[in-house]
Amino acid sequence: MAIQFYSNLGQYGFMSNFYKSEIIYNGKIYPTVEHFFQAHKAVAEQDHEFIRKSPNPGSAKKIGNSIQLRDNWEQIKDKIMLLGLMCKFTQNKDLADNLIATGTNYLEEASPTDNYWGKVNGIGRNQLGIGLMKVRELLNEIV
């Protein structure tokens, strides 16, 4: 069975990158995985900090889509996402337990517009869902 999620609301909202769950990485606090991901696009430290401190994940995404990107962004973006997800679920036991509770179900971001990180009307790469399933597998190995 597939578990679909999109927004940070509802039973599976905790899987959304917009879900409020502070993560700490390299001594910095990021309010959500979206903040973490968008900030790591930045070439300039001031852009990174502006995104990290932005008031909500929507604004973090908007700023992240308007800055100068790292030269290697396309090559590393999946790894950055996986790192953010690992931080989120290893730093919050309740969220880890919720992810593990999804069992072996296929996880799919049912996005209305993004067929890279999710699927639009069932079509797309679903890289976010794939990342979550990798994290779930690792959590199951260490629990």
Image: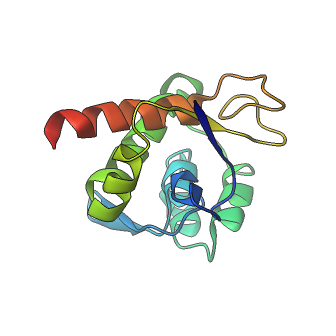
The image quadrant where one finds the N terminus is: top right
Residue 118 x/y as whole percent: 68, 34
Q: How is the image coloured?
A: rainbow
Q: Is residue 54 visible?
A: yes
Q: Is residue 100 above or below residue 44?
A: above
Question: Which residue is most to the front?
Answer: 1
Q: Is residue 92 visible?
A: no
Give the residue drawn at x 16%, y 44%.
143
- The residue positioned 56% from the left and 44% from the top of the image is 41
Side (left or right) of 13 relative to 21? right
Residue 38: percent from left, percent from top: 58, 51
Up-down relation of residue 91 to residue 70 (above or below): below
Please tell me in which quadrant of the rendered image residue 4 appears. top right
Q: Residue at x 58, y 64 (%)?
A: 51
In this rendering, position of residue 79 left or right of residue 34: left
Give whichever of 42, 18 is nearer the camera. 18
Across and down, in percent, residue 7 comes to 69, 57
Residue 53 vs residue 57, the one in the foreground: 57
The number of callouts visible is 0
Q: Which residue sits furthest bottom? A: 55
Q: Identify the residue at horizontal 63%, vertical 72% (top origin).
A: 56
